[in-house]
Amino acid sequence: MHTKGHGFNSFPVYFSKDGVVLTVNELSALLKRIIRQLPRLDITPPEFTVPKRANLPVIGQLTKEVSALDTKQDKLQEDMMSRIDNERTDQIANGEIDLYSNRQDATAPELKTGMRVDVVCNYSDDADDSELLMWCQGVIQQVSNGVNIAKEGGGYHKKGDVSVLWDADAEQNELASVSVVSLSKRLYNKQVEGSWRIDVDL
């Protein structure tokens, strides 16, 4: 698909080699390797084109019919690209495409001090049974080693928990604050409460 369907020649996917059909595990390993490498590469999508009349030498002047056909093809190309751009814009606006999610590494990174993270927080209102999950941004201030982040009631937060300085949120009428959260690798780059990801620049 990368090779034929969309013109991404950087990652040819072969279903056989030297006349031997590759196994599902071999194909899976190849696809996983591609997924790991994609976020680190700057790949320009190929330009989509509609079929055109062969560009043959012209003797004399083109007929009006041929000129009209060329104009029609150019218009089809322009309309197609416009539809693609509009559809992608709509998908991003509707949440069908998450640009931040698409920019994440395939596996959860090691949590470090100073790293900016997004975390899905629950702003649900128990009074009216509504559910509102939102991405909240903050900076990791400290990563627990099991004995360096104390709990208010005594003891320490478990190893791997992180202390996060949350950004102020005027829309939710929240000032900047600090809290300790557990960022599970199982919830990395998911879309449920407690999910998290790296806060990347677009």
Image (spheres, rainbow, N blue to C red):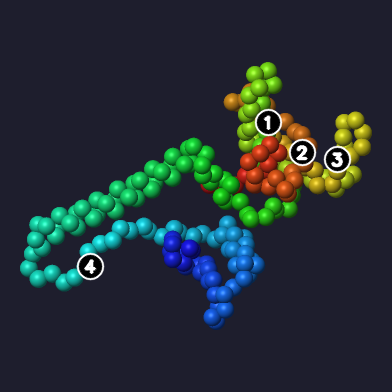
C-alpha span from label 4 to label 2: 62 Å
Secondary element type, mark 4: loop
Q: Which mark is residue 157?
A: 3
Snapshot quadrant of residue 129: top right
Q: Amino acid at mark 3?
A: His
Residue 111 seen in the current view: yes
Q: Which mark is residue 54?
A: 4
Label 2 or label 1, whichever lies nearer to me, is: 1
- Counting from the top left corner in percent of width and height, residue 19 is at 54, 80
Q: Is residue 147 left or right of residue 107?
A: right
Q: Residue at horizontal 70%, vertical 45%? A: 187
Q: Residue at horizontal 73%, vertical 53%? A: 110
Note whether 185 is above or below 139 in the view shown: below
Q: Amino acid at mark 2?
A: Val
Secondary element type, mark 1: strand
- Counting from the top left corner in percent of width and height, residue 73 is at 23, 55
Identify the residue position indicated by label 1 in the image.
122
Q: Amino acid at mark 4?
A: Ala
Label 4 or label 2, whichever lies nearer to me, is: 4
Label 3 or label 1, whichever lies nearer to me, is: 1
Note whether 125 is above or below 67 in the view shown: above
Note whether 15 is above or below 90 in the view shown: below
- Counting from the top left corner in percent of width and height, residue 71 is at 19, 54
Q: Which is nearer the N-term, disc 2 or disc 1?
A: 1
Secondary element type, mark 2: strand
Identify the residue position indicated by label 2 in the image.
181
Secondary element type, mark 3: loop
Q: Residue at horizontal 67%, vertical 55%? A: 107
Q: Is residue 41 left or right of residue 86?
A: right
C-alpha span from label 2 to label 1: 13 Å
